[in-house]
Amino acid sequence: MRWAGNANELNAAYAADGYARVKGMSCIITTFGVGELSALNGIAGSYAEHVGVLHVVGTPSTTSQAKNLLLHHTLGNGDFTVFHRMSSNLSETTAMITDVTTAPAEIDRCIRTTYIAQRPVYLGIPANYFDLKVPAALLNTPIDLELHPNEPEAEKEALDMILELIKDSKNPAILVDACASRHDVKAETNKLIELTQFPHFVTPMGKGAINEQHPRYGGVYVGTLSKPEVKKAVESADLILSVGALLSDFNTGSFSYSYKTKNIVEFHSDYIKIRNATFPGVQMKFVLDKLNAIIPEVVTGYKPTAVPARAPANKAVSGTTPLKQAWMWNQLSKFLKEGDVVIVETGTPGFGINETTFPKNVIGISQVLWGSIGYATGCTLGATMAAEELDPHKRVILFTGDGSLQLTVQEISTMIRWNLRPYLFILNNNGYTIEKLIHGPTAQYNEIQSWDHLKLLETFGAKDYENHRVATTGEWTKLTENKDFNKNSRIRVIEVMLPVMDAPESLIKQGELTAKINAKN
């Protein structure tokens, strides 16, 4: 275990989120009041997006609290529970340790809940408890991290209904979303795809959950923001098997899903919904596993329908052609490798990545629902630490905007401190392009102070590093095809120069949709 030592608590919360998305769980430790509140925005994002983060808070000693002392880091009103109450709204469960004899069991409970629920958990430990001894017996028993089985009758009824819908279907489709990754059903989902050969699609938050190299992969579905052929294929299906849906506005093209069928099966971590019937407590992991055991004999008569064609590779252009978003995100497919971790910031990267086809086993990380600007840089620190523990050769690749970077840039310092080696692609389009597209293309509040990005690594004390600036298609190709550049041997900043109002087509459409919705409301 490493004490990361982040530059501030907000960045630490983002980093804990990124670590947990790669390895399944993380822990952030903050001080009482000032520290925990600084982290709370990041914790809220983990709650919204189903990420298991254990938040340990060092609280004032029980004797100080009993004497109602006027302590630093408090509101000065004698209320020592206010911050705990605030966090309780953003936590799956909470615990305040007040009895050393029950403390080990309470801590184990918090760890299990964090891991199983994939939501933040708050654990407060008074300062005077840290030196107290507790029974060590529970250290001899591994924490139970297994899901408890579904209620058999409810599970069987749900399975029977799902199988009937599949038997009657001629044109089914599988749609995979964020919680397939968060709640660890990627293997079961990919097995279902392989066994059925149904056309399958991902949402923006679902990227990385399934094998996009599979011949039956159809693309990214975002409602009206989808490519026309993808929209038609999904919405004309007579059965939708939806795995791990998180139906937020940016994940659904402003709620523009338009299925023609009512035959929809939703697989969730703690319930199944089939048409209008809901099965509370029936967990998708067990249902998918049992479905896979039965499904081969059910789909023997299925005749595969066509899937949308892949986006063609970029046409050859002069190497002096200025870089633009559409070309870059398509071309990125050639640079990525199996096993990469790809992190994209809210803004143009979050929309542009939908134009990139991932190799196998890529972990995709974005914060489409919570959408806290600056998240991705802090997240990259945690994700890189986790990736390094899994495989020292695993590459972690960040795409962030010049505006977003300014919120959390300090965490590059922590990356350097730990000799981490991510690729930091900084898209320099001179300000908040996503905000300019939604509202205020010339407004001063969407502008930023320009930085010299190629001096950041030196400023933060890096010794072994690379800086690159690319502005043309030729410069991009030369860099990304360089063998040494493809090895994660050192930390790198790559500044990508782009036109101010250039953006992925889906983001332009999203901006128009959002502007219309705002005008109506």
Image: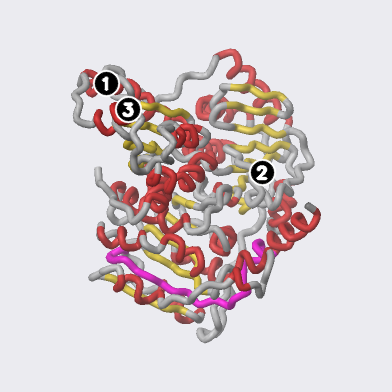
Q: Is residue 479 visible?
A: yes
Relative to the observer, which residue lies in front, 461 or 274?
Answer: 461
- Residue type at numbered disc 1: Val
State the image coordinates of residue 398 (x, y, percent, origin top left): 43, 61
Res. 100 mark: 1
Image position of 71 (left or right of 242): left
Would you name the residue on which mark 2 appears? 304
Residue drawn at point x = 61 percent, y = 63 percent = 311
Tell me the SS state at disc 2.
loop
Would you name the residue on which mark 3 appears? 67
Relative to the observer, which residue lies in front, 341 or 511?
Answer: 511
- Residue type at numbered disc 2: Pro
- Residue type at numbered disc 3: Lys
**Magenta span has 388?**
no
Q: Which residues are magenta?
A: 488-508
Q: Is residue 216 visible?
A: no
Quarter location, residue 130: top left
Q: Give me the C-alpha separation between circle 3 and circle 1.
A: 20 Å
